Amino acid sequence: MRPQTHQCLSDRNTPFDSFFSKPSKLLFPLLRRLCGALHKEKHATMDIALELTDKYIFDHLYSAILPAKPISYNLEGSANATILDLKAASPWQYERSNSWLSFEPTDAAYTSQWTRDNPTRQLISLFLITWIVGAAIYFLVSTLSYIFVFDKTTFKHPKFLKNQIRMEISQAVNSMPFIALLTAPFFFAEVRGFSKLYDRSAEGPGVWYDYFQFPLFLVFTDFWIYLIHRGLHHPLIYKTLHKPHHKWIMPTPYASVAFHPVDGFLQSLPYHVFPFIFPLQKFAYLGLFAFVQIWTVFIHDGEYVANSPILNGAACHTMHHLYFNYNYGQYTTLWDRLGGSYRKPNEELFRRESKMGQKEWERQVAEMEKKVLEAEGEDDRVYEDKKLK
């Protein structure tokens, strides 16, 4: 048996070689350089979600699509190599991604030409995880909010659109794969070890930071989302990127991800940039991402619970959808107050007998129609056939 060598896809004889036979003279040397650069770190930070899905899904998928060959692992002569031979010769060996959970690999982890540390495989897997898991969270949280929280009286609002929920879901579903495509490179850089993510407290700044990272994350992302969101309302950008999300004057929970894909990606950018600037514990990262998804749904649920001068809750965000140029923040009203864009929700919204009352709706519609003309020039939405009485 030859000495083990670490090979990237570009060093192996794969089914794609014949297709790329001419371009490979230029392409493969570049890929070899890239693979070498990506393997400089001694311990790549393998993402928990990637390790989990590798064991139960992707190991089997890639083994079926690109089964390992003896030549892939420098095993000479024998087409009858056993799984033990493949394991022994594999350039990839299992290392836990964290000290809390372990997902021991099955034999399928060693029976593909693309081992788990293959950059192309990781990029594809992370794209699929981001897309599918994001869609699952969206439908689960939005549906639960719609059933148990969302005020169905919203359907009677004169600015609720015809077939609105169907259109919200369609916009979200069509945008998700493109948002995932733009997001996956950030997760890829994280699992290759280029971020400041850490596992155990001893690897971070200290126990104090295990607590401090949460408010730091919220303040950092709230500030940058405020700036990005406000920038998306600039006349040169608004109609192209942000107008699709403002189609929903009276949003439902399903509007939470109903963005133009570039808009959705730009507003999520601070979440992905944070762990490259500041240390962040891995499980805290997963928890904060879950919180962000849930919060995004809640501010579109139409249930105005938080009458708070600090929190940017559903009532504040409804003001934004109705009147466009106010309340750009994500979690708090801090940056809107400092930036002069805060608008206090009408007190009527917090009283059930008046929040969906005729007088309140008349006031909302009168001002909203003026704001639409200022921002968009014309209102091309198709509303349900409802009239204020």
Image (cartoon, grey):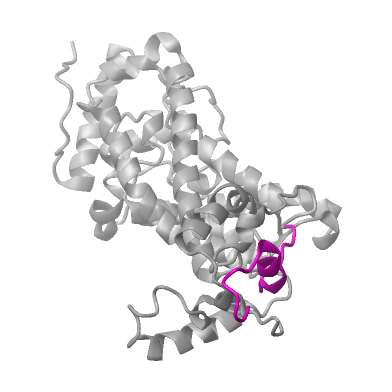
Task: From the viewer's perspective, tell me whether residue 201 is left or right of residue 33.
Answer: right
Query: 120 or 199: which is nearer to us?
Result: 120
Residue drawn at (61%, 76%) of the image: 73
Tell me where the magenta segment starts and ends, as one range: 75-96
| Vertical side of 14 occupied by 33: above or below | below
Q: Is residue 79 magenta?
A: yes
* Quarter of the C terminus within the rendering: top left
Count of marks, rendered view: 0
Q: Is residue 124 magenta?
A: no
Measured from the top left, where is residue 47 in percent x and y?
64, 57
Measured from the top left, where is residue 259 in percent x and y?
34, 46
The quarter holding residue 18 reads bottom left
Task: From the viewer's perspective, tell me whether residue 257 is left or right of residue 106.
Answer: left
* Quarter of the N terminus within the rendering: bottom right
| Vertical side of 98 occupied by 118: above or below | below
Residue drawn at (36%, 35%) of the image: 255
Residue drawn at (76%, 56%) of the image: 199
Magenta-highlighted stretch: main secondary structure?
A: loop
Judge whether residue 185 can be spotted in this image.
no
| Vertical side of 148 occupied by 89: above or below | below
Judge whether residue 148 can be spotted in this image.
yes
Residue drawn at (40%, 85%) of the image: 27
Query: 132 or 65: which is nearer to us?
Result: 65
Query: 76 or 388: which is nearer to us?
Result: 76
Task: From the viewer's perspective, tell me whether residue 313 is left or right of residue 364.
Answer: right
Measured from the top left, where is residue 258 in percent x and y?
34, 41
Measured from the top left, where is residue 111 in percent x and y?
58, 62
The quarter holding residue 206 reads bottom right
